[in-house]
Amino acid sequence: MQKSRLKRKSECEWHIEPFGDMRVPAVIFATDDLIEDMDDKVYEQVTNVAKLPGIQKASYAMPDAHWGYGFPIGGVAAFDPDEGGVISAGGVGFDISCGVRTLHTGLSRDDIERVKEPLAHELSRKIPAGMGSRGRIHLNPQEMDDMLKGGAQWAVSRGYGTPQDLQRTEEDGCMAGADPSVVSTQAKKRQKDEMGTLGSGNHYLEIQEVMEVYHAETAEVFGISPGDIVLSIHCGSRGLGHQIGTEFLKSMVLAAPGYGIKLPDRELACAPIHSEVGQQYLGAMRSAMNCAMANRQIITHLAREAFSDILPKAELDLLYDVSHNTCKLEEHDIDGTTKSVFVHRKGATRSFGPGHPDIPEIYRSTGQPVLIGGTMGTASYILCGTEQTMGLAFGSAVHGAGRKMSRRKATKQWKGRSVVDELYKRGIIIRSPSMRGVAEEAPGAYKEVSEVVDAADKAGLARKVARVEPIVCVKG
Amino acid sequence: MTKIDPEQIHTQWEHFPHEADMGIRGYGSTPAEAFEQAALALTGVITDPEHVDPSKRMEVHCEVDDPELLLVDWLNAVIYEMAIHKMLFSRFEVSIDGPRLEGELWGEPAVVGKHHPAVEVKGATYTCLRLAQEADGRWVAQCVVDV
């Protein structure tokens, strides 16, 4: 993206003043290098979002922004329902409530090193991954509805985890306002055998080592120090969320003209929040959010079983669980007035700062943990919300490295087997059902996650707390 | 109906790059044939269609009064069948009558050891969605799929 098209406000903040049908400015947070590498499609998409009815303050793009569906991936936008504000299926994405959770293990590198092979095997055996895999939990229609209403709380009530897990999950593990009656039979059918499965693409389960701590005080509150082993899970709402995204994208495209909404791009399909389609989507999307949280909770339980078989002394306590494809009703200061707005975060993590009532009491003094996934060969990061973040982009930050190379190009450049062998030499074990999948996810196909995280830190969107590196990675 | 002829397969469907996902494109002498080829390109995102035995037949029906939206509906119908039956498909037959599409799919259950599926496809999107007749008379049907 050409910098000349943007107005620089500070080292990491760039503005696009409204033009054409834009109702508000667009704001991109990034360093010079990231802006130069950013796809022009981000410019087009972030300005298109600014044209939607009821948008508040600005349309934002995070430092890891890239070409998405209507909204850029790494896009944040808030809408006031009382000003004709809309909700957009594309603004949440197909993988509703995709997110990351990180668990402590209470182990050191020495504990892991001698058993990492059998542990990798056991984790990949217990947690099905990849296309066509089935979970071991099969829900009947009543259980499906209970799960969609209860989320991780339902999972814990079924014995998959502890009440403490819920205290460390956004929304205490249960998104209020879910309405399973507006979730189609097809979506439920697609989920029937998928509870406790990881999925594919960039989803993973990783055993990681804390390599460096940047903010000792916060790291202490988070309970992490160099040399600690943690477990991270990245996945979402599986087939149910994908089907809901698919169905509502279509119904919103078809309904938009009837609501008098002119779509700058079909992918921006949306409906007024105060409309039948808008309310139905809200009820279905919130059900999918519960599905995602329940799924990560079940995977946590399965991972605990795998660890207890091999390393009985491991204690997998949850650090935090955050989603990065969501739309949530939140209170924000809009030009001096507190308003209730629907905040879309598409490929962006919530990053509430210290003192916010929506974050668990244990993290109230530091700001919420912000978990950023990297690649199987580089690093992931743990950050926290800051004092400024609420005033920047509705309390939001980056979500990951973001690709820099298409899957097609990646498979031409790398062979899956050599990626696995290369990483093995560096002490990293990869388990995946597909070597082509590994090639498509090769570390080199992604942007440097550290640049994205440094930009978020510099911009004040989140503060760097620690860097973790993979030891075992289970991929779909 | 489009047969999978190894000689022709790569000239009739292809992938095009998208930053995070994958573009699929099918060519044919009619829109229906282009739809069939686009579905082969969809399978090609996951595995080599030549390795998928077309032994089991299924049917899908779609209806929407917009030819491009019909393409997305068709691809999403194939994605749905793949997801709930854990199957892969390598042969497609489509007939289109106004807003209505009747589709037949032939394939087999996905087997990791045989197909090594690279990814699962979440859904077909409206990004780069295009159904048009090219200057040479061929129809092209394309969109980006989310993986």
Image (cartoon, grey):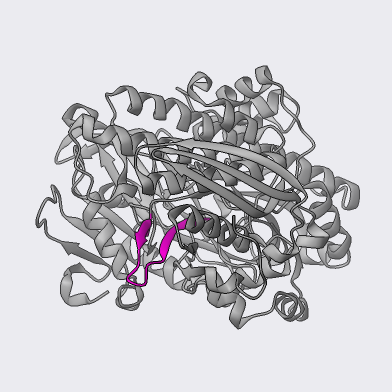
Disc tally is 0
Q: Position of residue A417 (x, y in %)?
A: 75, 76
Q: Position of residue A452 (x, y in %)?
A: 42, 68
**The one of A119 and A387 positioned closer to us in this rendering:** A119
Q: Position of residue A162 (x, y in %)?
A: 70, 31
Is A198 situated left or right of A359 in this image? right
Q: Position of residue A252 (x, y in %)?
A: 34, 35
For residue A7: magenta?
A: no
Is A206 situated left or right of A63 in this image? right
Which quadrant holds residue A78? top left
A355, above or below A284, in the image: below
Residue at 72% of width from left, 69% of height from top?
Answer: A435
**The one of A357 and A150 positioned closer to us in this rendering:** A150
Instruction: Please say whether residue A315 is visible from this viewpoint.
Output: no
**The one of A117 and A43 positioned closer to us in this rendering:** A43
Q: Which residues are magenta?
A: B127-147
Is B14 situated left or right of A265 in this image? right
The quadrant of the image that shows the C terminus of chain A is bottom right
The quadrant of the image that shows the N terminus of chain A is bottom left
Instruction: Please say whether residue A218 is visible from this viewpoint.
Output: yes
Is B16 situated left or right of A17 in this image? right
Residue at 54% of width from left, 73% of height from top?
Answer: B11
A111, above or below A365, in the image: below
Residue at 22% of width from left, 38% of height from top?
Answer: A333
For residue B141: magenta?
A: yes
